[in-house]
Amino acid sequence: MTRTAYTFEVADISALAKALVRQLEGAAQPPGHLAMLNMLARGAGWRNFQHFRASRSAEVALAEAPAAEVTDFAQVTRALRQFDAQGRLIRWPSRASQVTLCLWPLWARIPADTSMTEREISARLDAWHLFGDAAQLRRSMVGARMLSRRPDCTDYRRVEQRPPPEALALIGQLQART
C-alpha cells in the first residue's frame, strides 16, 4: 500500500511537548499508532490526525497551478461577426461550431437564480436578437445545458457554470461595444 507523506511543522516544540505530556498523563497504557498520531496532531493545533491530513491535502491541491486555458481568438473574431454594434445577435450562425459560442452572450444576460415563464424568457431573447426566432434560441440553450426547464415549460432558469475561454472573450468584447 502506498503511503502519502505529510510534512509536520510545529511553531513551538515546547508547547507540543507539554501537550503530549498532558495527553499521556491520562493514559492507562502506552498509546497505539493512531492514538499517537491524534496526540501529535492535537498538540500542533488540529482536532485530530484526520483533520491534519485533510488540511495538508487541501493545501497541496490549492498550491497546484491550474492548467492555463487557451483561447482561440480566431473563433471569437468569427463569432463577433454575428453581432451588431449593440451586441444583438444578427442571424443564426451557419457553422455548427459557432452556434453554442454565440449563445453564451445571451446566457450571460439572463439573471441568475431567477425563475421565468416561457413568455418571459422569450421576451428577453427577442430583445437580444434580430432574426425573430426566440423558440430556436430557447431550445438551443436548453440543449446546450445553458438553461433548464420543467417538462411542462413553465419554469426556465439559467444553469450556473463557467463559460469556456472563447465565450468569456466574446462576452468581454460585446460588453466593450455597449
Image (spheres, grey):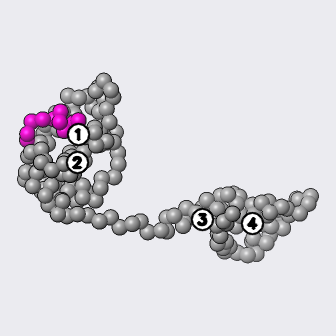
What amino acid is labelled 2 in the image? Thr
Residue under numbered circle 2: 100
Amino acid found under the numbered disc labelled 4: Leu
Image spot of residue 73 (x, y percent): 19, 64
| Nearest the eye: 134 or 55 | 134
x, y percentage for residue 5?
A: 65, 70
> Seen in the image, is 56 located left or right of residue 162?
right
Q: Quadrant of the N terminus?
A: bottom right
Lower position in the chain sequence, tag 3 or tag 4: 4
- Which mark's residue is nearer the viewer, 3 or 4? 3
Residue for badge 3: 56
In which image quadrant can residue 147 be found?
Answer: top left
Query: Which one is earlier in the sequence, the residue at label 2 or at label 1?
Result: 2
Residue 74 percent across, percent down from the top left: 17, 63
Task: Mark yes or no: residue 133 visible.
Answer: yes
Residue 140, numbered label = 1
Report, in whole angstroms, how far the alpha carbon at label 2 lies from the one at label 1: 8 Å
The answer to whether residue 113 is above or below residue 8 is above
Describe the element under mark 3 as helix, strand or loop: helix
Q: Main secondary structure of the magenta part?
A: helix
User: What residue lies at 78% left-to-right and 66% top-to-bottom?
Assistant: 19
Helix, strand or loop at disc 1?
Answer: helix
Q: Which tag, 3 or 2, sits closer to the chain's start?
A: 3
Q: In the image, which residues are magenta?
A: 130-139
The label nearer to you, 3 versus 1, is 1
* Three-letter amino acid code of the residue under disc 1: Ser
User: Viewer-proximal residue, 44 or 157?
Assistant: 157
Q: Residues within 10 Å of mark 4 (few under 14, many from 20)?
A: many
Q: Earlier in the sequence, mark 1 or mark 4?
A: 4
